[in-house]
Image (tube, helix red, strand yellow):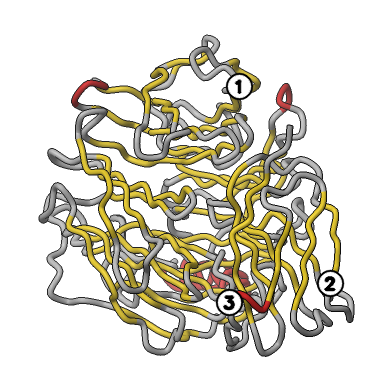
Amino acid sequence: MFKQANTLLILFMLPMFCLAQDGVEANLLGHWHDPSIPGSSFYDNRYNEVWGHYVNGREIGIIGSTQGTHFIDVTDPASPEEVAFVAGKFQGTSVVHRDYKTFGNYIYAVCDEGPSSLQIFDVSDLPDTVYTVYDSDALFVRAHNCWVDTSSQKFYLFAAGGGALGFTGLAVYDISEPLNPVFINKFNSIGGFGFGHVHDGFVRNDTAYLNCGNDGFCVADFSNPASPTLLGTMTGYQGAGYNHAGWLSEDAQYYYLTDETHGSPVKTVDVSDFADISVVDTYNAESVQSQIPHNPIVACDYLYVSYYYDGLQVYDISDPENVTRALYYDTYDAPDGTSYKGAWGVYPFLPSGNILVSDMQTGLYVFEGVGDGCNGPSVAVQNPAQNDFEIYPQPASDFLTIAMNGSLEDMHLQLVNSEGKTVWFQANLPASDQVQLELPAGLPNGLYILHLKGEKQMSTHKLLIQRN
């Protein structure tokens, strides 16, 4: 009986080991870690969320810790360097969660422990310095996660509370004046769908995709943020667990969802019809125990997932209903367990295409990207003088003219919104010193970052889009 049981176990496990060979191990380029930072008393995590920013020709990794926010210059990924640090209003071993989102050159930061605050950082002078331009608990004290919808200039808080806010599942603020957030409303239900809290969410053009923990998933229209409209829900589905986080595909047809539950797979969710939201594919880290997916992000045809014990996982989603694994790297080399350790967050939107990952115990990792051109070529580039280029009109509405003291031949254009997301990519500009391009339809008004990249040079410009 003992031999038979072991034989069956081996036969059961063999396919799992075969699956584990799918994809390619990612190429580690660099690593930053400060062992003097104390770990939390809950999970021994020194670190939490990671975000990124590109400014003044430098790529910056932003990683939270029990102490505050660390700004790491990763332009040379082999030599990451901390160039700035801002202490959190609340620090210490009670801190587990921090979260970050970008609005232009402002970083909005929240913490979910202690007497904390909303912090807003001006990072326009990085890598030289960071300015803390707002640090107050007047609006709220704590929040689990946050989001900035740049198209409508709204700031969303998830699982937030304290101070004037009280405690609520979801709160919305007007940030048309970025340093003067104005409270709009708070919610524990929308259109009859109740939630104990919203753990996280993704919002684009006022359509909010909300991950509501044990209450499931819902989509709502926040065009009227004081009174949103429920568009659809999904509460019972394959592999359901604690509905944790997700990210919308660029064509808005699919939502990639993670349940923070041991053994629960990542899901491709068809959201093309809000009346019939459904899971159309599931996949995991392809490990024997199939551990816990955490935070997912979509960039072009790839889904990037920080997968706790299983580290970084990157999936090819060019066929959303038949997803395959492309890259992986285990950042946590201790044995798997039943707690929460390892890769917390991932950020794939740097112009180099490199991928940032935060590991709860061991810090910031920089990996070579998939090289799909979504975020620009993964090559060393030089920054020509900005006056070598003319970008006009400013503000732009329908057309954009780019003129250069030289030839634009084979340069690529990348337009990035204030979330760090590529919203327009134009490859191989013509062999001319001037080109007029039609702006893509549907780009919301706002401030963007325009990157012009060639094999040996890169130039960055601010672009203001203002349509009537």
User: Could you tell me how far apart the alpha carbons at marks 2 and 1 are, in whole angstroms?
Assistant: 39 Å
Quadrant position of the N terminus in the picture: bottom left
Check the image and report above or below for 203 versus 81. above
Identity of the residue drawn at 58% across and 49% down: 447
Residue under pointer 2 = 434
- Tell me the SS state at disc 2: strand
- Image quadrant assignment for residue 301: bottom right
- Tell me the SS state at disc 3: loop
Identity of the residue drawn at 26% across and 28% down: 139
Identity of the residue drawn at 61% across and 39% down: 238
- Closer to us: 110 or 468: 468
- Tell me the SS state at disc 1: loop
Residue under pointer 3 = 352
Q: Looking at the image, is mark 3 or mark 2 earlier in the sequence? A: 3
- Closer to us: 375 or 309: 375
Amino acid at the residue labelled 2: Gln
Residue under pointer 1 = 223
Q: Looking at the image, is mark 1 or mark 3 earlier in the sequence? A: 1
Check the image and report above or below for 216 versus 466. above
- Closer to us: 119 or 309: 119
Amino acid at the residue labelled 3: Ser
Does residue 102 appear left or right of residue 397 in this picture?
Answer: left
Identity of the residue drawn at 69% across and 34% down: 278
**Dot 3 surroundings within 10 Å: few (below 14), some, or many (20 or more)?**
many
